[in-house]
Image (tube, grey):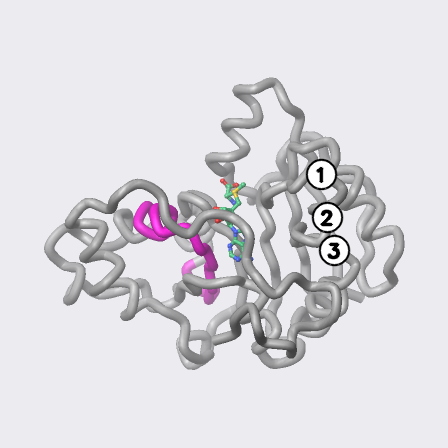
Amino acid sequence: MRDEQDDEWPEGIPHRLYGRRRGKKLRPRQERLLSEALPRLRFTDLAFALGADALWFEVGFGGGEHTLAQMTANPGTAIIASEVYEHGLCSLLTEIIPDGGEATAPIPPRLRLWPADARELLLALPEASLDRLFLMFPDPWPKTRHAKRRFVHPEMIPILARVLKPGAQWRVASDDPTYQAWVTEVFAGQDAFVGGAPATIRPESWPGTRYEAKAFAAGRKPLYWSFRRL
Ligand SMILES: C[S@@+](CC[C@H](N)C(=O)[O-])C[C@H]1O[C@@H](n2cnc3c(N)ncnc32)[C@H](O)[C@@H]1O
């Protein structure tokens, strides 16, 4: 596991993860989900993806609505879903593990969770191993001095280009005007991915998320990009 002192991070990528891991005190069921169910679902290697139609990766799944919808709609696809926020992990685990079955209930065979910085695993996965990446409503870090904390970043492009297969899709959604302009700028300055203008209406097969619902409720207008790895 990397830490703040680890100097192996690519230059430009902050060594520490920004954002919350813990929120308010966990209830006993949530404690059990994290201590008993999560270790069984935690990603360790790619064996769970053997024979799958494809391998997808979701960065920062929040409450997990998008992950669950994709898993249900695409049972033959293997999905690695990452989230650092404990309450987010519990939200998803609550949906797939019955109360009392934390240590014993069968786990979805094609789903694995990465309860740590997604960048860490993206750096470690084999080259050209992913067919799709989802980045739904990433933390916007709108202040210029925090730009390095944004997941979409010039320093991240080679990392994603390495791990995505040629032809793989990278979906990005954002409702934040600063981040929207930033995505346009960052992708204009690279040549590993192509993508046209973003959609203003969520494309079919893109399940909604909690943050998208919040954006609509606040009157913000999300944009949806589909980039393709060349
Ligand atoms: C604004 S929320 C969006 C959540 C969800 N995708 C949605 O649309 O509702 C961003 C999430 O990304 C998570 N996150 C931020 N940086 C991350 C990282 N490096 N690895 C994994 N998760 C991360 C945060 O904990 C947070 O839950």
Whole-percent x and y of residue 217? Answer: 52, 20
Residue 81 belongs to magenta span: yes
Residue under the point 57% across and 61% down: 16
Q: Looking at the image, do the residues carrying marks 1 and 2 touch, with CB atoms under 8 Å apart?
A: yes
Task: Say few, some or many: other residues with alpha carbon within 10 Å of mark 2 (under 14 / 14 to 19 / 20 or more).
Answer: some
Q: Is residue 198 at least partly visible in the picture?
A: yes
Nearer the viewer's eye, disc 3 or disc 1? 1
Residue 3 vertical placement versus 186 (above, below) = below
- Alpha carbon of mark 1 to alpha carbon of mark 2: how far? 7 Å
Please name the amino acid that badge 2 sits on.
Ala
Q: Quadrant of residue 215?
A: top right
Whole-percent x and y of residue 18? Answer: 55, 52
Q: Quadrant of residue 122?
A: bottom right
Which label sits on residue 143?
1
Say which residue label 3 marks: 153
Magenta segment range?
75-91
Q: Quadrant of residue 169?
A: bottom right
Residue under the point 69% across and 37% down: 142
User: Which residue is outermost to the front?
Assistant: 5
Whole-percent x and y of residue 12? Answer: 74, 64
Q: Nearer the viewer, residue 214 or 68?
A: 214
Residue 226 belongs to magenta span: no
Question: Does label 3 or label 2 sit earlier along the sequence?
Answer: 2
Say which residue label 2 marks: 147
Please name the amino acid that badge 3 sits on.
His
User: Which residue is outermost to the left?
Assistant: 100
Asked if disc 2 is less than 8 Å from ligand 1, the answer is no
Question: Does label 3 or label 1 sit earlier along the sequence?
Answer: 1
